[in-house]
Image (cartoon, rainbow, N blue to C red):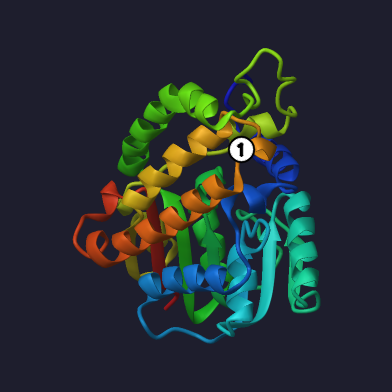
Amino acid sequence: MAAAPTTPEAIREVNVRYHDAAARSYDAKWGVDLGPVGQAQVLGKVRKALGPRFGPFARSLEIGAGTGYFTLNLVQAGVVRSATATDIAPGMLEALEASAARIGMGDAIETVQADAESLPFADASFDLVMGHAVLHHIPDPAAAFAEFHRVLRPGGTLLFAGEPSRRGDRIAAYPKRVALRLAPAWRRALRLRPGHGFGEEDRGAPADEALEGLVDVHSFAPDDLASHARAAGFDRVRVRGEELLANWFGWTNRTLEASARAEDIPWLWTQYAYRGYLALQHVDRLLLEPRLPPAIFYNLMIAARRP
C-alpha cells in the first residue's frame, strides 16, 4: 500500500487522484439521492445545525461539493437561490454537472475547480459557505476557515457537516473489525464473489481508487472545529454530533459490501442496508443526539456567523 501523504502538496494530489477516480461510482457507493429522500436528509442536517428557521440564502458557496449532494438538494428545495460549487477534483465537478443537467438544473449551478485554502472569489461574495464531509481532507483547516470568513458577507452563515469526530472514529473501528471477520461467511451465505483485494483471482482495484485509505488526514474533537472558527473571526459558533447507531449499522454493512463485487450484491440486501440506515438516523436524531455529548458521535457539524 502507498505511504500516507505528509506534505500539503501530496495530500492535495492524492485527494485529486482518488476523487477523480471515485466520481464515476460515488453516488451509488454512498447512496446519494437527489430526490425527496435526499432533500429531506440535507434539510434535516441544515435544520439541526441552524435551527428551525433558516434561509433562503441568495448566494451560496459549497467547498468540496463532490457530486452535488448538498448544493443540488438545497437549490431544489428553494433554500439557495444561486449556487457555486467548488472541488479540487475535476472529475467530481463533471459528475455534479451531469447530475444537474439530468434533473433540469444545468444552468442553475456554477462549478469552479478551487482549493479551499485559496479561494478565487472576492471578499464578501456569499451569504452561505457550506460543505459536507470535506474539512478532514484539507491540509490546513485554519487557513481554510480564514478563507471562508473572507468570502462571507457580514452576517453570513457558515455550515459544515459530516466531519469525523476523533472519539467517534475510534468507536466506529469496532463494527468495521467485526464485519471484516464476518465477511467470508456473509459472502458464502449470499453466494457472492470476493471483491477487490479479497480473493486471489481478483485483479485488484484501479490504482487511484485504491487510495481511499489515504485521503482522510484529520479527525476532530468538537473544540477543534470551534477553535478554528473563532480564530478566523466567526461568532455564534455551535458544534453538535450526528449519527451513532446509524453509523455503526452503516459501517458494518459498508465493510461487508466492500468485501464483495458490487455487481453481485442483491437488490434486497441493498434495500435493507439503505432503509435500515435511514431508520436508525431517525432514532439518533430523536433520542440520542439531543442527549449525548457531541464527541461520541461519528459525525460533527459546525455552524457559525460572520459578524
Picture quarter with the N terminus: top right
Q: Position of residue 150 (x, y in %)?
A: 56, 69
Q: Position of residue 138 (x, y in %)?
A: 56, 46
Image position of 32 (left or right of 16): left
Give me the residue at 55% from left, 82% from top. Answer: 79
As rendered, which of 145 and 25 lies closer to the eye?
25
* 120 in relation to 196, above or below: below
Residue 239, compared with residue 263, is above or below; it is below
Give the quadrant of residue 3: top right
Callout 1: SS: helix
Residue at which label 1 appears: 8
In the image, 63 versus 183, the foreground residue is: 183
Residue 137 image offset from top left, x and y in percent: 55, 45
Q: Please identify the quadrant where the C terminus is shown.
A: bottom left
Residue 293 locus on image (x, y percent) = 22, 55
Looking at the image, which residue is at 60% across and 43% down? 266
Give the class, few, some or many, for how many residues have Cα within 10 Å of label 1's Cα (few <14, many ≥20): few
- Residue farthest top in this picture: 200
Q: Is residue 231 visible?
A: no
Give above or below for 281 relative to 48. Answer: above
In depth, the one of 116 and 45 nearer the eye is 45
Residues 15 and 7: in front is 15
Q: Mark 1 is on which residue type?
A: Pro
- In this view of the protein, can residue 93 be seen by the observer? yes
For the point 47% across and 40% down, the residue is 253
Q: Quadrant of residue 110?
A: bottom right
Q: Residue at x 75, y 77 (%)?
A: 105
